[in-house]
Amino acid sequence: MPRSVILEEIDQALAHYDSAHGRPVAIELGERKYTQLILDVAALHADGGELTTNTGRPLAYRGLEILRDDVHRDRVRIL
């Protein structure tokens, strides 16, 4: 299965996060991206993908809340 585009976008946002603001605590996703993440992670889990935990959260984001932003439908923001 090809890597998810939204997972790559989140990885990029985390890579560019300024650690001077402290440890990231949340990933805020626009409604479309939030929905796509749920679909992509479900597909990875169904195929036995290595990126998921038993809760469906990508391992790289363990400990981070994933929040939905209904206003900015295509934004990815690290809080």
Image (cartoon, grey):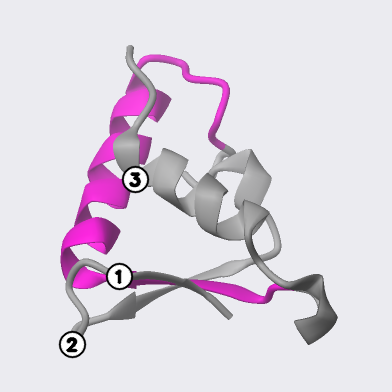
In the rendered view, tell whether residue 15 sits above or below residue 63. above
- N-terminal of the pair, mark 1 or mark 3, is 3
Query: How would you rate the neighbour count of disc 3 (Cα within 10 Å): few for under 14, some for 14-19, many for 20 or more?
Result: some
Q: Disc 2 or disc 1, which is closer to the eye?
A: 1
User: Which quarter of the rendering shows the N terminus?
Assistant: top left
In the rendered view, tell whether residue 54 sits above or below residue 27. above
Check residue 65 for magenta coloring: no
In the rendered view, tell whether residue 42 sits above or below residue 30. above
**What residue did someone put label 1 on?**
75
Magenta stretch, residue numbers: 24-52
**What residue did someone put label 2 on?**
71
Query: How would you rate the neighbour count of disc 1 (Cα within 10 Å): few for under 14, some for 14-19, many for 20 or more?
Result: some
Q: Quadrant of residue 24?
A: bottom right
Q: Position of residue 23 (x, y in %)?
A: 79, 74
Q: Position of residue 62 (x, y in %)?
A: 67, 54
The label shown at residue 6 is: 3
- The local secondary structure at tag 1 comes to loop
- The local secondary structure at tag 2 comes to loop
Q: Of 38 and 20, which appears nearest the observer?
A: 20
Q: Residue at x 47, y 44 (%)?
A: 56
Q: Amino acid at mark 3?
A: Ile
Q: Residue at x 22, y 49 (%)?
A: 36
Q: Image check: 34 left or right of 9?
A: left
Q: Amino acid at mark 2?
A: Val
In the rendered view, tell whether residue 30 sits above or below residue 54. below
Q: Residue at x 34, y 32 (%)?
A: 4
Q: Position of residue 61 (x, y in %)?
A: 62, 53
Query: How would you rate the neighbour count of disc 2 (Cα within 10 Å): few for under 14, some for 14-19, many for 20 or more?
Result: few
- The local secondary structure at tag 3 comes to helix
Q: Amino acid at mark 1?
A: Arg
- N-terminal of the pair, mark 2 or mark 3, is 3
